[in-house]
Protein backbone atom coordinates (compact mmCIF):
# COMPACT_ATOMS: atom_id res chain seq x y z
CA UNK A 1 0.00 0.00 0.00
CA UNK A 2 1.36 3.38 -0.99
CA UNK A 3 1.74 6.18 1.51
CA UNK A 4 -0.62 9.15 1.24
CA UNK A 5 2.12 11.22 -0.39
CA UNK A 6 2.88 8.50 -2.94
CA UNK A 7 -0.84 8.16 -3.71
CA UNK A 8 -1.16 11.90 -4.37
CA UNK A 9 2.03 12.09 -6.45
CA UNK A 10 0.95 9.05 -8.51
CA UNK A 11 -2.39 10.70 -9.30
CA UNK A 12 -4.31 7.88 -7.58
CA UNK A 13 -6.08 9.96 -4.91
CA UNK A 14 -9.80 10.62 -5.31
CA UNK A 15 -11.52 13.95 -4.59
CA UNK A 16 -15.03 14.62 -3.36
CA UNK A 17 -16.48 18.13 -3.00
CA UNK A 18 -19.88 18.87 -1.48
CA UNK A 19 -21.75 22.19 -1.32
CA UNK A 20 -23.53 22.08 2.04
CA UNK A 21 -25.82 24.71 3.48
CA UNK A 22 -23.13 26.38 5.59
CA UNK A 23 -19.91 24.92 4.26
CA UNK A 24 -18.35 23.74 1.02
CA UNK A 25 -16.08 20.83 1.90
CA UNK A 26 -13.45 18.92 -0.05
CA UNK A 27 -12.14 15.50 1.01
CA UNK A 28 -9.24 13.71 -0.64
CA UNK A 29 -9.14 9.93 -0.09
CA UNK A 30 -6.53 7.27 -0.73
CA UNK A 31 -6.90 3.86 -2.37
CA UNK A 32 -8.21 2.43 0.90
CA UNK A 33 -10.97 5.09 0.95
CA UNK A 34 -9.42 6.87 3.94
CA UNK A 35 -9.48 10.68 4.09
CA UNK A 36 -5.95 12.05 3.72
CA UNK A 37 -6.56 15.79 3.23
CA UNK A 38 -9.39 18.29 3.51
CA UNK A 39 -10.38 21.82 2.56
CA UNK A 40 -13.41 23.97 3.36
CA UNK A 41 -15.14 27.28 2.70
CA UNK A 42 -17.75 28.73 5.05
CA UNK A 43 -20.79 30.38 3.48
CA UNK A 44 -24.38 31.30 4.26
CA UNK A 45 -27.52 31.67 2.17
CA UNK A 46 -28.99 35.15 1.78
CA UNK A 47 -32.63 36.21 1.90
CA UNK A 48 -33.04 38.36 -1.23
CA UNK A 49 -36.47 39.67 -2.27
CA UNK A 50 -38.07 37.15 0.06
CA UNK A 51 -36.22 34.11 -1.36
CA UNK A 52 -33.25 32.16 0.00
CA UNK A 53 -30.33 32.14 -2.44
CA UNK A 54 -26.57 31.89 -2.99
CA UNK A 55 -25.08 34.04 -5.75
CA UNK A 56 -23.38 32.48 -8.77
CA UNK A 57 -20.26 34.48 -7.88
CA UNK A 58 -20.18 33.01 -4.38
CA UNK A 59 -20.65 29.47 -5.71
CA UNK A 60 -17.44 29.77 -7.77
CA UNK A 61 -15.48 31.70 -5.19
CA UNK A 62 -16.44 29.10 -2.61
CA UNK A 63 -15.39 26.21 -4.83
CA UNK A 64 -12.06 27.83 -5.66
CA UNK A 65 -11.27 28.77 -2.07
CA UNK A 66 -12.27 25.31 -0.85
CA UNK A 67 -9.96 23.64 -3.37
CA UNK A 68 -7.16 26.10 -2.56
CA UNK A 69 -7.51 25.17 1.12
CA UNK A 70 -7.27 21.50 0.15
CA UNK A 71 -4.07 22.18 -1.80
CA UNK A 72 -2.67 24.03 1.18
CA UNK A 73 -3.47 21.07 3.45
CA UNK A 74 -1.75 18.69 1.02
CA UNK A 75 1.37 20.86 0.86
CA UNK A 76 1.43 21.24 4.65
CA UNK A 77 1.06 17.53 5.36
CA UNK A 78 2.93 15.94 2.46
CA UNK A 79 5.03 18.68 0.83
CA UNK A 80 3.70 17.86 -2.63
CA UNK A 81 1.25 19.19 -5.23
CA UNK A 82 -1.98 17.74 -6.63
CA UNK A 83 -1.31 17.31 -10.35
CA UNK A 84 -3.85 14.63 -11.25
CA UNK A 85 -6.49 12.45 -9.62
CA UNK A 86 -8.03 9.04 -10.23
CA UNK A 87 -11.55 10.47 -10.07
CA UNK A 88 -13.62 13.41 -8.84
CA UNK A 89 -17.19 13.77 -7.64
CA UNK A 90 -19.36 16.82 -6.92
CA UNK A 91 -22.44 16.94 -4.75
CA UNK A 92 -24.63 19.59 -3.19
CA UNK A 93 -27.83 20.24 -1.30
CA UNK A 94 -30.72 18.83 -3.30
CA UNK A 95 -33.75 20.39 -4.95
CA UNK A 96 -34.22 24.08 -5.62
CA UNK A 97 -34.36 25.94 -8.91
CA UNK A 98 -31.55 26.82 -11.30
CA UNK A 99 -32.90 27.78 -14.72
CA UNK A 100 -30.65 28.81 -17.62
CA UNK A 101 -31.14 30.12 -21.14
CA UNK A 102 -29.50 28.83 -24.32
CA UNK A 103 -26.35 30.85 -23.53
CA UNK A 104 -26.08 29.06 -20.14
CA UNK A 105 -26.90 32.30 -18.30
CA UNK A 106 -28.95 31.95 -15.13
CA UNK A 107 -32.39 33.49 -15.64
CA UNK A 108 -33.33 34.19 -11.98
CA UNK A 109 -31.26 33.91 -8.80
CA UNK A 110 -30.74 30.35 -7.56
CA UNK A 111 -33.69 29.38 -5.34
CA UNK A 112 -32.59 26.90 -2.68
CA UNK A 113 -34.43 24.02 -1.00
CA UNK A 114 -35.21 26.35 1.89
CA UNK A 115 -37.84 28.36 0.01
CA UNK A 116 -41.48 27.64 0.80
CA UNK A 117 -43.20 29.90 -1.74
CA UNK A 118 -44.35 27.01 -3.92
CA UNK A 119 -47.40 25.83 -1.97
CA UNK A 120 -49.97 26.24 -4.74
CA UNK A 121 -47.78 24.51 -7.34
CA UNK A 122 -46.83 21.61 -5.05
CA UNK A 123 -50.47 20.99 -4.08
CA UNK A 124 -51.69 20.96 -7.70
CA UNK A 125 -48.87 18.69 -8.86
CA UNK A 126 -49.38 16.28 -5.95
CA UNK A 127 -53.02 15.95 -6.99
CA UNK A 128 -52.15 15.61 -10.69
CA UNK A 129 -49.50 12.93 -10.11
CA UNK A 130 -51.20 11.25 -7.10
CA UNK A 131 -47.76 11.49 -5.55
CA UNK A 132 -46.39 13.75 -2.84
CA UNK A 133 -44.54 16.63 -4.50
CA UNK A 134 -42.74 18.69 -1.83
CA UNK A 135 -42.44 22.47 -1.87
CA UNK A 136 -38.69 22.39 -2.39
CA UNK A 137 -38.59 20.10 -5.45
CA UNK A 138 -37.47 21.64 -8.72
CA UNK A 139 -40.74 20.78 -10.46
CA UNK A 140 -42.65 22.72 -7.78
CA UNK A 141 -40.46 25.78 -8.32
CA UNK A 142 -40.86 25.53 -12.08
CA UNK A 143 -44.63 25.20 -11.96
CA UNK A 144 -44.94 28.03 -9.43
CA UNK A 145 -43.10 30.27 -11.88
CA UNK A 146 -45.53 29.15 -14.57
CA UNK A 147 -48.56 29.84 -12.36
CA UNK A 148 -47.18 33.30 -11.65
CA UNK A 149 -46.58 33.91 -15.38
CA UNK A 150 -42.91 34.67 -14.83
CA UNK A 151 -41.52 36.03 -18.08
CA UNK A 152 -38.26 34.07 -17.89
CA UNK A 153 -39.96 30.65 -18.18
CA UNK A 154 -40.24 30.84 -21.98
CA UNK A 155 -36.45 31.23 -22.21
CA UNK A 156 -35.53 28.14 -20.18
CA UNK A 157 -33.27 25.68 -21.98
CA UNK A 158 -31.64 24.02 -18.97
CA UNK A 159 -33.06 23.24 -15.51
CA UNK A 160 -30.85 21.61 -12.91
CA UNK A 161 -29.72 21.46 -9.28
CA UNK A 162 -26.64 23.03 -7.71
CA UNK A 163 -24.62 19.80 -8.04
CA UNK A 164 -25.77 19.41 -11.62
CA UNK A 165 -24.80 23.01 -12.43
CA UNK A 166 -21.27 22.72 -11.02
CA UNK A 167 -20.71 19.38 -12.76
CA UNK A 168 -22.05 20.76 -16.05
CA UNK A 169 -19.72 23.74 -16.01
CA UNK A 170 -16.65 21.65 -15.12
CA UNK A 171 -17.25 18.77 -17.54
CA UNK A 172 -19.56 20.10 -20.24
CA UNK A 173 -21.95 17.21 -19.46
CA UNK A 174 -25.57 18.12 -18.60
CA UNK A 175 -26.30 15.09 -16.42
CA UNK A 176 -27.46 14.26 -12.91
CA UNK A 177 -27.16 11.30 -10.55
CA UNK A 178 -30.44 9.45 -10.08
CA UNK A 179 -30.69 10.33 -6.39
CA UNK A 180 -30.42 14.06 -7.06
CA UNK A 181 -32.70 13.73 -10.09
CA UNK A 182 -35.38 12.18 -7.88
CA UNK A 183 -35.56 15.51 -6.03
CA UNK A 184 -36.38 17.37 -9.23
CA UNK A 185 -39.33 15.24 -10.39
CA UNK A 186 -40.23 11.67 -9.35
CA UNK A 187 -38.05 8.89 -10.71
CA UNK A 188 -39.35 5.44 -11.70
CA UNK A 189 -37.23 2.87 -9.79
CA UNK A 190 -37.85 0.34 -12.57
CA UNK A 191 -36.35 2.51 -15.32
CA UNK A 192 -34.09 4.62 -13.08
CA UNK A 193 -35.21 7.65 -15.09
CA UNK A 194 -37.79 10.40 -14.70
CA UNK A 195 -41.29 8.94 -14.37
CA UNK A 196 -42.54 8.96 -17.97
CA UNK A 197 -46.23 9.19 -17.04
CA UNK A 198 -45.66 12.21 -14.82
CA UNK A 199 -43.49 13.92 -17.43
CA UNK A 200 -46.27 13.44 -19.98
CA UNK A 201 -48.92 14.75 -17.57
CA UNK A 202 -46.85 17.84 -16.85
CA UNK A 203 -46.28 18.57 -20.52
CA UNK A 204 -50.02 18.23 -21.15
CA UNK A 205 -50.77 20.51 -18.19
CA UNK A 206 -48.63 23.38 -19.47
CA UNK A 207 -49.25 22.85 -23.21
CA UNK A 208 -51.72 25.78 -23.41
CA UNK A 209 -48.86 28.11 -22.44
CA UNK A 210 -47.11 27.39 -25.73
CA UNK A 211 -43.56 27.27 -24.36
CA UNK A 212 -40.90 26.22 -26.91
CA UNK A 213 -39.78 23.31 -24.71
CA UNK A 214 -41.03 20.15 -23.07
CA UNK A 215 -39.84 18.86 -19.71
CA UNK A 216 -37.57 16.27 -21.32
CA UNK A 217 -35.90 19.05 -23.31
CA UNK A 218 -34.73 20.96 -20.25
CA UNK A 219 -33.96 18.28 -17.64
CA UNK A 220 -30.49 16.70 -17.21
CA UNK A 221 -29.84 13.15 -18.40
CA UNK A 222 -30.12 10.70 -15.49
CA UNK A 223 -27.16 8.46 -14.59
CA UNK A 224 -26.75 5.85 -11.85
CA UNK A 225 -23.83 5.27 -9.50
CA UNK A 226 -20.86 3.67 -11.23
CA UNK A 227 -21.37 5.31 -14.61
CA UNK A 228 -18.82 7.80 -15.88
CA UNK A 229 -20.26 11.29 -16.26
CA UNK A 230 -17.55 12.95 -18.33
CA UNK A 231 -14.10 14.27 -17.53
CA UNK A 232 -12.76 17.51 -16.10
CA UNK A 233 -12.23 19.81 -19.07
CA UNK A 234 -9.49 22.40 -19.52
CA UNK A 235 -12.11 25.10 -18.96
CA UNK A 236 -13.30 23.25 -15.88
CA UNK A 237 -9.79 23.17 -14.43
CA UNK A 238 -9.66 26.97 -14.63
CA UNK A 239 -12.91 27.18 -12.63
CA UNK A 240 -11.61 24.81 -9.94
CA UNK A 241 -7.85 25.25 -9.51
CA UNK A 242 -6.68 28.83 -9.86
CA UNK A 243 -3.07 27.70 -9.34
CA UNK A 244 -3.12 25.85 -12.67
CA UNK A 245 -1.44 22.70 -11.34
CA UNK A 246 -4.35 20.31 -11.86
CA UNK A 247 -4.53 18.59 -15.24
CA UNK A 248 -7.64 18.10 -17.38
CA UNK A 249 -9.05 14.70 -18.34
CA UNK A 250 -9.83 13.37 -14.84
CA UNK A 251 -12.94 11.09 -14.84
CA UNK A 252 -15.92 12.51 -12.94
CA UNK A 253 -18.79 10.50 -11.43
CA UNK A 254 -22.47 11.49 -11.67
CA UNK A 255 -23.24 14.55 -9.50
CA UNK A 256 -25.35 13.67 -6.49
CA UNK A 257 -27.41 15.35 -3.80
CA UNK A 258 -26.51 15.53 -0.15
CA UNK A 259 -29.14 12.93 0.74
CA UNK A 260 -27.47 10.37 -1.52
CA UNK A 261 -23.96 11.10 -0.29
CA UNK A 262 -25.22 10.83 3.29
CA UNK A 263 -26.55 7.35 2.54
CA UNK A 264 -23.20 6.34 1.07
CA UNK A 265 -21.19 7.85 3.95
CA UNK A 266 -23.25 5.82 6.45
CA UNK A 267 -23.38 2.59 4.44
CA UNK A 268 -27.16 2.91 4.12
CA UNK A 269 -27.98 2.12 0.48
CA UNK A 270 -29.21 -1.44 1.07
CA UNK A 271 -32.87 -2.24 1.75
CA UNK A 272 -33.85 -2.15 5.46
CA UNK A 273 -31.09 0.31 6.28
CA UNK A 274 -31.47 4.00 6.96
CA UNK A 275 -29.69 7.12 8.06
CA UNK A 276 -30.46 10.45 9.66
CA UNK A 277 -28.56 13.55 8.62
CA UNK A 278 -28.85 16.30 11.20
CA UNK A 279 -27.17 19.65 10.63
CA UNK A 280 -28.64 22.91 9.31
CA UNK A 281 -31.60 20.84 8.14
CA UNK A 282 -32.43 17.27 9.07
CA UNK A 283 -33.70 14.36 7.07
CA UNK A 284 -34.10 10.65 7.49
CA UNK A 285 -33.68 8.19 4.63
CA UNK A 286 -35.12 4.69 4.93
CA UNK A 287 -34.44 2.31 2.00
CA UNK A 288 -37.71 0.46 1.40
CA UNK A 289 -38.41 -3.16 0.53
CA UNK A 290 -41.66 -2.13 -1.21
CA UNK A 291 -43.59 1.08 -2.00
CA UNK A 292 -45.75 2.68 0.68
CA UNK A 293 -49.48 1.96 0.64
CA UNK A 294 -50.35 5.55 -0.31
CA UNK A 295 -48.80 9.03 -0.63
CA UNK A 296 -48.16 11.06 2.53
CA UNK A 297 -47.60 14.79 2.43
CA UNK A 298 -44.78 14.57 5.01
CA UNK A 299 -42.89 11.75 3.29
CA UNK A 300 -40.95 12.24 0.06
CA UNK A 301 -40.14 9.34 -2.23
CA UNK A 302 -36.61 9.60 -3.64
CA UNK A 303 -33.89 7.07 -4.51
CA UNK A 304 -30.45 5.90 -3.50
CA UNK A 305 -27.57 6.77 -5.88
CA UNK A 306 -28.10 3.37 -7.50
CA UNK A 307 -31.86 3.85 -7.90
CA UNK A 308 -33.53 2.01 -4.99
CA UNK A 309 -36.71 3.52 -3.52
CA UNK A 310 -36.26 5.61 -0.37
CA UNK A 311 -38.75 7.17 2.03
CA UNK A 312 -37.41 10.58 3.01
CA UNK A 313 -38.66 12.77 5.84
CA UNK A 314 -37.15 16.22 5.33
CA UNK A 315 -37.22 19.05 7.87
CA UNK A 316 -36.08 22.54 6.92
CA UNK A 317 -34.68 23.28 10.38
CA UNK A 318 -32.39 21.46 12.78
CA UNK A 319 -29.34 22.89 14.56
CA UNK A 320 -29.36 26.58 13.54
CA UNK A 321 -31.34 27.68 16.60
CA UNK A 322 -29.13 25.62 18.91
CA UNK A 323 -26.11 27.36 17.37
CA UNK A 324 -27.72 30.74 18.07
CA UNK A 325 -28.27 29.90 21.74
CA UNK A 326 -24.73 28.53 22.12
CA UNK A 327 -23.54 31.81 20.58
CA UNK A 328 -25.39 33.62 23.38
CA UNK A 329 -23.58 31.53 25.99
CA UNK A 330 -20.33 32.36 24.19
CA UNK A 331 -21.06 36.09 24.54
CA UNK A 332 -21.77 35.66 28.26
CA UNK A 333 -18.51 33.76 28.71
CA UNK A 334 -16.61 36.51 26.89
CA UNK A 335 -18.36 39.12 29.04
CA UNK A 336 -16.86 37.42 32.08
CA UNK A 337 -13.44 37.47 30.43
CA UNK A 338 -13.29 33.68 30.16
CA UNK A 339 -11.54 32.29 27.04
CA UNK A 340 -13.97 30.45 24.76
CA UNK A 341 -13.28 27.05 23.20
CA UNK A 342 -16.38 26.40 21.08
CA UNK A 343 -15.87 22.63 20.99
CA UNK A 344 -15.67 22.58 24.78
CA UNK A 345 -18.70 24.85 25.09
CA UNK A 346 -20.84 22.70 22.82
CA UNK A 347 -19.65 19.55 24.57
CA UNK A 348 -20.46 20.79 28.07
CA UNK A 349 -23.90 22.12 27.09
CA UNK A 350 -24.85 18.99 25.12
CA UNK A 351 -23.73 16.69 27.94
CA UNK A 352 -25.64 18.81 30.45
CA UNK A 353 -28.81 17.99 28.49
CA UNK A 354 -28.49 14.32 29.48
CA UNK A 355 -29.13 15.38 33.10
CA UNK A 356 -32.49 16.90 32.15
CA UNK A 357 -35.90 15.35 32.67
CA UNK A 358 -36.97 12.87 29.99
CA UNK A 359 -39.80 15.24 28.97
CA UNK A 360 -37.63 18.38 29.38
CA UNK A 361 -39.67 19.45 32.41
CA UNK A 362 -42.39 20.83 30.11
CA UNK A 363 -40.09 23.22 28.20
CA UNK A 364 -40.54 23.40 24.41
CA UNK A 365 -38.31 24.68 21.60
CA UNK A 366 -39.52 25.57 18.11
CA UNK A 367 -36.36 25.83 16.02
CA UNK A 368 -38.04 27.38 12.97
CA UNK A 369 -35.42 29.71 11.52
CA UNK A 370 -37.23 29.22 8.20
CA UNK A 371 -40.63 27.80 7.28
CA UNK A 372 -41.38 24.17 8.11
CA UNK A 373 -43.66 22.43 5.58
CA UNK A 374 -44.16 19.31 7.72
CA UNK A 375 -46.01 21.37 10.33
CA UNK A 376 -47.58 23.75 7.83
CA UNK A 377 -45.51 26.85 8.67
CA UNK A 378 -44.69 29.03 5.67
CA UNK A 379 -42.18 31.14 7.62
CA UNK A 380 -40.01 30.67 10.66
CA UNK A 381 -40.03 32.30 14.09
CA UNK A 382 -37.66 30.58 16.55
CA UNK A 383 -39.49 30.31 19.88
CA UNK A 384 -38.72 28.98 23.34
CA UNK A 385 -41.94 28.23 25.22
CA UNK A 386 -42.54 27.51 28.92
CA UNK A 387 -45.14 28.04 31.60
CA UNK A 388 -44.42 29.44 35.03
CA UNK A 389 -44.82 25.94 36.46
CA UNK A 390 -42.36 24.11 34.22
CA UNK A 391 -38.97 22.95 35.50
CA UNK A 392 -36.73 25.68 34.12
CA UNK A 393 -33.11 24.51 34.43
CA UNK A 394 -30.08 24.58 32.17
CA UNK A 395 -30.28 20.80 31.67
CA UNK A 396 -33.96 20.94 30.67
CA UNK A 397 -33.33 24.03 28.54
CA UNK A 398 -30.62 22.29 26.51
CA UNK A 399 -32.55 19.04 26.30
CA UNK A 400 -35.62 20.90 25.00
CA UNK A 401 -33.52 22.42 22.22
CA UNK A 402 -31.99 19.07 21.31
CA UNK A 403 -35.46 17.51 21.25
CA UNK A 404 -36.82 20.46 19.27
CA UNK A 405 -34.13 20.01 16.61
CA UNK A 406 -35.51 16.54 15.73
CA UNK A 407 -39.15 16.87 16.80
CA UNK A 408 -40.50 17.37 13.29
CA UNK A 409 -38.42 14.43 12.07
CA UNK A 410 -40.43 12.20 14.42
CA UNK A 411 -43.74 13.19 12.78
CA UNK A 412 -42.94 11.47 9.49
CA UNK A 413 -41.06 8.53 10.92
CA UNK A 414 -43.97 7.64 13.19
CA UNK A 415 -46.00 7.15 9.98
CA UNK A 416 -43.33 4.87 8.52
CA UNK A 417 -42.78 2.70 11.58
CA UNK A 418 -46.26 2.72 13.15
CA UNK A 419 -48.70 3.09 10.25
CA UNK A 420 -46.77 1.53 7.36
CA UNK A 421 -44.96 -1.05 9.53
CA UNK A 422 -41.67 -0.40 7.70
CA UNK A 423 -38.89 -2.63 8.96
CA UNK A 424 -35.33 -1.40 9.37
CA UNK A 425 -32.26 -3.27 10.60
CA UNK A 426 -29.95 -0.31 11.15
CA UNK A 427 -30.26 3.49 11.35
CA UNK A 428 -27.03 5.50 11.31
CA UNK A 429 -26.74 9.14 12.34
CA UNK A 430 -24.35 11.72 10.92
CA UNK A 431 -23.95 15.48 10.98
CA UNK A 432 -23.18 18.16 13.55
CA UNK A 433 -26.04 17.07 15.84
CA UNK A 434 -24.05 13.92 16.64
CA UNK A 435 -20.64 15.54 17.11
CA UNK A 436 -20.76 15.36 20.92
CA UNK A 437 -20.36 11.63 21.55
CA UNK A 438 -23.49 9.83 22.68
CA UNK A 439 -25.76 12.82 23.20
CA UNK A 440 -27.47 13.24 19.83
CA UNK A 441 -27.67 9.46 19.52
CA UNK A 442 -29.51 9.19 22.83
CA UNK A 443 -32.02 11.88 21.86
CA UNK A 444 -32.71 10.45 18.38
CA UNK A 445 -33.03 6.90 19.76
CA UNK A 446 -35.75 8.22 22.08
CA UNK A 447 -37.49 10.07 19.24
CA UNK A 448 -37.57 7.11 16.82
CA UNK A 449 -37.73 4.36 19.47
CA UNK A 450 -34.92 2.63 17.62
CA UNK A 451 -31.21 1.96 18.19
CA UNK A 452 -29.04 4.61 16.52
CA UNK A 453 -25.51 3.96 15.31
CA UNK A 454 -22.79 6.52 14.69
CA UNK A 455 -19.54 5.71 12.90
CA UNK A 456 -16.17 7.32 13.49
CA UNK A 457 -16.22 8.34 9.82
CA UNK A 458 -19.65 10.02 10.09
CA UNK A 459 -18.00 13.37 10.70
CA UNK A 460 -16.49 13.21 7.21
CA UNK A 461 -20.00 13.70 5.85
CA UNK A 462 -21.18 14.09 2.28
CA UNK A 463 -17.83 15.16 0.79
CA UNK A 464 -16.48 11.77 1.81
CA UNK A 465 -19.65 10.17 0.47
CA UNK A 466 -19.26 11.68 -3.00
CA UNK A 467 -15.55 10.74 -2.96
CA UNK A 468 -16.65 7.13 -2.30
CA UNK A 469 -19.05 7.34 -5.25
CA UNK A 470 -16.20 8.59 -7.43
CA UNK A 471 -14.10 5.70 -6.15
CA UNK A 472 -16.87 3.24 -6.95
CA UNK A 473 -16.97 4.54 -10.52
CA UNK A 474 -13.20 4.14 -10.85
CA UNK A 475 -12.69 0.85 -8.99
CA UNK A 476 -15.84 -1.28 -9.11
CA UNK A 477 -15.39 -4.78 -10.48
CA UNK A 478 -18.93 -5.88 -11.20
CA UNK A 479 -20.03 -5.21 -7.63
CA UNK A 480 -23.24 -3.49 -6.68
CA UNK A 481 -22.83 -0.23 -4.79
CA UNK A 482 -24.12 -1.88 -1.61
CA UNK A 483 -21.57 -4.72 -1.88
CA UNK A 484 -18.75 -2.31 -2.70
CA UNK A 485 -19.48 -0.27 0.41
CA UNK A 486 -20.04 -3.29 2.64
CA UNK A 487 -16.98 -5.23 1.53
CA UNK A 488 -14.37 -2.63 0.59
CA UNK A 489 -15.22 0.58 2.43
CA UNK A 490 -16.78 -0.38 5.74
CA UNK A 491 -15.69 -4.03 5.99
CA UNK A 492 -18.57 -4.90 8.30
CA UNK A 493 -18.16 -1.87 10.59
CA UNK A 494 -21.59 -0.67 11.73
CA UNK A 495 -20.35 1.87 14.28
CA UNK A 496 -21.32 2.36 17.92
CA UNK A 497 -24.99 1.87 18.74
CA UNK A 498 -27.16 3.36 21.50
CA UNK A 499 -30.58 1.82 22.21
CA UNK A 500 -33.48 3.85 23.61
CA UNK A 501 -34.65 3.45 27.18
CA UNK A 502 -38.34 3.12 28.00
CA UNK A 503 -38.11 6.24 30.17
CA UNK A 504 -36.59 8.34 27.36
CA UNK A 505 -39.13 7.11 24.78
CA UNK A 506 -42.03 7.94 27.08
CA UNK A 507 -40.46 11.33 27.87
CA UNK A 508 -40.03 12.22 24.21
CA UNK A 509 -43.64 11.20 23.55
CA UNK A 510 -44.82 13.59 26.29
CA UNK A 511 -42.62 16.33 24.83
CA UNK A 512 -44.17 15.78 21.38
CA UNK A 513 -47.70 15.97 22.77
CA UNK A 514 -46.85 19.34 24.36
CA UNK A 515 -45.13 20.38 21.12
CA UNK A 516 -48.22 19.61 19.03
CA UNK A 517 -50.57 21.27 21.51
CA UNK A 518 -48.58 24.51 21.45
CA UNK A 519 -48.05 24.72 17.68
CA UNK A 520 -50.76 27.46 17.48
CA UNK A 521 -48.35 29.68 19.44
CA UNK A 522 -45.76 29.29 16.67
CA UNK A 523 -48.42 29.90 14.04
CA UNK A 524 -49.51 33.07 15.81
CA UNK A 525 -45.90 34.28 15.90
CA UNK A 526 -45.61 33.77 12.15
CA UNK A 527 -48.86 35.53 11.29
CA UNK A 528 -48.48 38.45 13.71
CA UNK A 529 -44.88 39.49 12.99
CA UNK A 530 -43.99 40.81 9.56
Image (tube, helix red, strand yellow):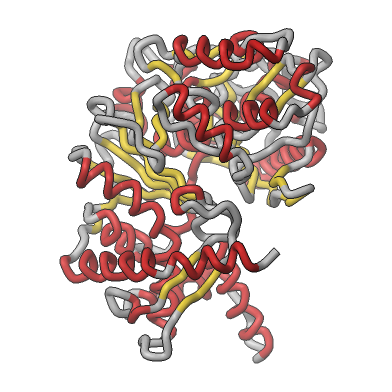
Quadrant of the drawing holding the C terminus: bottom right
Whether residue 273 is situated above or below residue 153 in the rendered picture: below
**Closer to the camera, 222 or 50?**
50
Give me the residue at 37% from left, 17% from top. Answer: 189
**How many discs mark residues in the rendered view?**
0
Residue 186 at x, y = what percent? 46, 22
Please identify the quadrant where the N terminus is shown: top left
Q: Taking the image as drawn, is residue 27 in sight?
A: no
Name, please, the residue furthest toward the front.
Answer: 208
- Residue 3 drawn above or below residue 238: below
Q: Residue at x 33, y 81 (%)?
A: 361
Camera sees residue 524: yes
* For residue 51, above or below residue 11: below
Relative horizontal placement of residue 366, taking residue 175 as reference (left or right):
left
The residue drawn where x is 21% and y is 61% is 500
Q: What residue is at 62 percent from the left and 85 percent from the top? A: 333
Up-down relation of residue 95 to residue 10 (above or below): below
| Residue 446 location, quadrant | bottom left
The spot of residue 153 in percent (x, y) is 74, 22
Name the residue nearer the viewer: 384 or 303: 384
Q: Where's residue 464, x and y in %?
A: 50, 37
Query: Which quarter of the picture shows residue 391?
Result: bottom left
Residue 476 image position (x, y, % from top left): 40, 16
Picture quadrant where residue 234 is located: top right
Residue extending farthest to the left is: 502
Looking at this view, is 529 or 36 the one in front? 529
Closer to us: 400 or 215: 215
Amino acid sequence: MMTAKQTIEAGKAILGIEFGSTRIKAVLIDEANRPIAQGAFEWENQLVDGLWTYSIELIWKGLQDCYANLRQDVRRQYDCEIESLAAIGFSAMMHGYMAFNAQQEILVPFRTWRNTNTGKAAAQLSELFHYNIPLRWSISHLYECILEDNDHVKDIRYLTTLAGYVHWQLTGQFVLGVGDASGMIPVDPATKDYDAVMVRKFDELIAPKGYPWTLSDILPKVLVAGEQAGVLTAEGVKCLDLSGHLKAGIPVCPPEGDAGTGMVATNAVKQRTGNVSAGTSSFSMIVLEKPLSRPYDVIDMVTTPDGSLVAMVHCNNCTSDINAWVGLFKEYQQLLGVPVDMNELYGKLFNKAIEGDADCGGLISYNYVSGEPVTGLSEGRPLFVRSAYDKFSLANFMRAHLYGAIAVLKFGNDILFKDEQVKVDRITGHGGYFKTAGVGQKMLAAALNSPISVMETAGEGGAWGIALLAGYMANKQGQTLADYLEQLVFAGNTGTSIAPTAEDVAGFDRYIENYKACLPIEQAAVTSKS
